[in-house]
Amino acid sequence: EIVLTQSPAILSLSPGERATLSCRASQSVDTYVVWYQQKPGQAPRLLIYDASKRATGIPARFFGGGSGTDFTLTISSLEPEDFAVYYCQQRINWPRTFGQGTKVEIK
Amino acid sequence: EVQLVESGGGLVQPGGSLRLSCAASGFTFSNYEMNWVRQAPGKGLEWVSYISNSGSAIHYADSVKGRFTISRDNAKSSLFLQMSSLRAEDTAVYYCARARRYSAGDFDSWGQGTLVTVSS
């Protein structure tokens, strides 16, 4: 099973600041990494697939990068609605696995 | 508009069974692979099971293998999860999630979830 480790666990930032979230895989997943956003009481929402492709309707301030074992999700300038929990996930192997999540909170 | 609506959750005793359903609308259900993903209270996401669009390919997480069975009815645009031998650690919100077409693993649409509580 591929283990995904996200860091940091909590990121405290102010609106307008840049957020950089990390996801590290226990073995290479090529570029088959996905990022989701989840707000309290809501289902997750697909943000990024194949490491760097924005899903339909996702604002340009979200961008993903990386390949192999190291991936990042960057939010260039935080909007109030961006404060949420973010999960990475791999889709190269079964079982599909998620990282434990990074909470982006208002400082 | 894509809609996924789960039902069937509730309180069940350890060792019991439950059948979850997911009604899909707004897209051609038979063209898409589907999944179940769960989230224990206050915890992260855990993928549970996958079924191909025809139902010919199925995968399970080790934590549920042998106890849960995924199935689908394309004629009724419905996805199911039969859960048996339930344990306290199966307590979670269960989401039905559509895989982005041809990806098998990006979940581009999710239902609102149904809560399963396993407790005596």
Image (spheres, coloured by chain):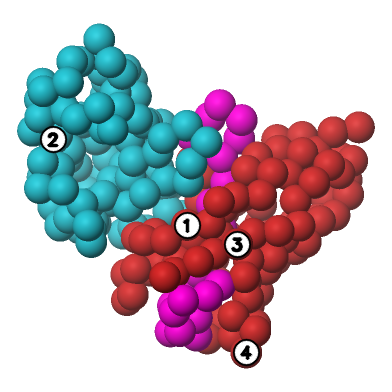
Q: Residue B75 has which mark? A: 4
Residue of label 1: B110
The quarter of the displayed image where residue A37 is located: top left
Q: Badge 4, how many Cα within 10 Å: few under 14, some, many 20+? A: few
Q: Helix, strand or loop at disc 2?
A: strand
Closer to the camera, B29 or B82? B29
* Label 1 secondary element: strand
Residue B56 in view of the camera: no
Do marks 3 and 2 share a chain? no
Q: Which one is earlier in the sequence, the residue at label 3 or at label 4?
A: 3
Give whichever of A41, A97 is nearer the camera. Answer: A41
Determine contact: label 4, label 2, CB under 8 Å.
no
Q: Which residue is mark 3?
A: B5
| Mark 2 burial class by Cα count in 10 Å: few <14, some 14-19, many 20+ | some
Residue B37 x/y as whole percent: 54, 52
Magenta highlight range: B24-44
Q: Secondary structure at mark 4?
A: helix
The amino acid beneath tag 3 is Val
